[in-house]
Amino acid sequence: MNTYERPAIHRIIASLLLAAISSMAVAREKAIDLKLTAAQIVDKNVAARGGLEAWHKVDTMIEIGHLETTNAAAPLVPFVLQLKRPNKSRFEIHSQDSTSVRIFNGTTGWRVRPQRGGVPELTPFTPTEVKAALDAPGIDGPLFDYLAKGVSVDLDGIDEIDGHKAFRLAVFLASGAARHIWIDATTFLDVKSDRKVQTATGESVVTVAVRNYKLVNGLQIPHTIETIGAAGHGSEKMVIEQVIVNSPLTDHVFTRPNVPMRAPVNPMVGAGPQRMPAFPAPIAPSAPPSAPSQPPGPNPQ
């Protein structure tokens, strides 16, 4: 083969590769059933994530990882998120030898903020924060057992997310809050969601992208969750490094921390990015009632 023939051969190979890629894309599009109903899409999503039975067996979940923030002073911040059914959560952030906590026990919540001098201060959730916590996805999200949760789901359209077709579902929670959830039309895994929030300047939209699914105890769990905040508030990426399923968590983990409390403030005054501040030491819950004394014996653990 002389030097004049080589470019022609390369062009032929390139054309064949492009044709093959195009053919695969067409086949993929044909394999997508665009006539599915909202209920059928939800059923396929539940199955893709591990199935209803497997998720029903999950009572607690602990996620450990780090946040990638736009805060130059703390671009990587370790976190621990503890979840327990039906709607309990404890979110801890550890930064520069300090910790901050948000706790919700299913009805009431608390935030711990640092104060000058290193003394933490407890603030109860505002009514808006309680509502947001009640509407949070929890362990499995709004699509699992959605009818039993009083959630309604409509097929709102089909969009392209990161080069792939995705069903756009309009999701209406029992509280009346609305969400959009995008389900990949091939894998049937969640890829994106959004919700409206109130800010100091009015109503805005928070978008959450989920990706990097990994199999944990038979469950498909996203290990990268990127939140794009309300206008001007930047983005924050949650990178999950470890997921622990059904580790024992007592309700005491989600009780009011034993630190000084002050009255809640209006979150709309001077609203900015909702960053979790830090304080000098881990905050323990209030002490539980003392148990009756027992005779000495072997350690049950």
Image (cartoon, rainbow, N blue to C red):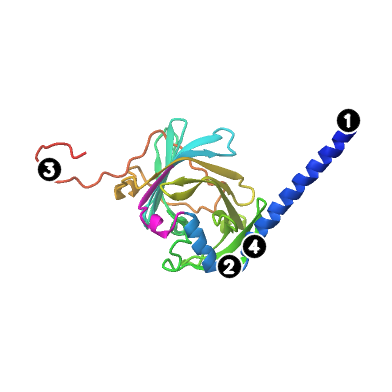
Foreground of the two, 126 or 248: 248
The residue at 59%/49% (across/down) is: 229
Of the numbered discs in the image, which one, if any, rests on residue 158? 4
| Three-letter code, disc 3 | Ser
Of the numbered discs in the image, which one, if any, rests on residue 79? none
The magenta span reads 50-63
How far from the left and from the top, in percent, is residue 175?
47, 66
Q: Is residue 35 left or right of residue 290?
A: right
Point out the tag, 4 or 2, that comes first from the N-terminus: 2
Q: Are marks 3 and 1 in contact (CB under 8 Å)?
A: no
Residue, disc 2 = 36
Residue, disc 3 = 293
| Three-letter code, disc 1 | Asn
Point out the tag, 2 or 3, that comes first from the N-terminus: 2
Mark 2–mark 3 Cα distance, whole angstroms, equals 61 Å
How far from the left and from the top, in percent, is residue 207?
59, 53
Q: Nearer the viewer, mark 1 or mark 2?
A: 1
Q: Is residue 87 visible?
A: no
Q: Are marks 4 and 1 in contact (CB under 8 Å)?
A: no
- Check residue 55 for magenta coloring: yes
Q: Quadrant of the C terminus?
A: top left
Q: Is residue 161 above or below residue 212?
A: below
Secondary structure under badge 1?
A: loop
Q: Nearer the viewer, mark 2 or mark 3?
A: 2
The residue at 39%/55% (across/down) is: 54
Q: Nearer the viewer, mark 3 or mark 4?
A: 4
Q: Quadrant of the N terminus?
A: top right
| Three-letter code, disc 4 | Ile
Point out the tag, 3 or 1, that comes first from the N-terminus: 1
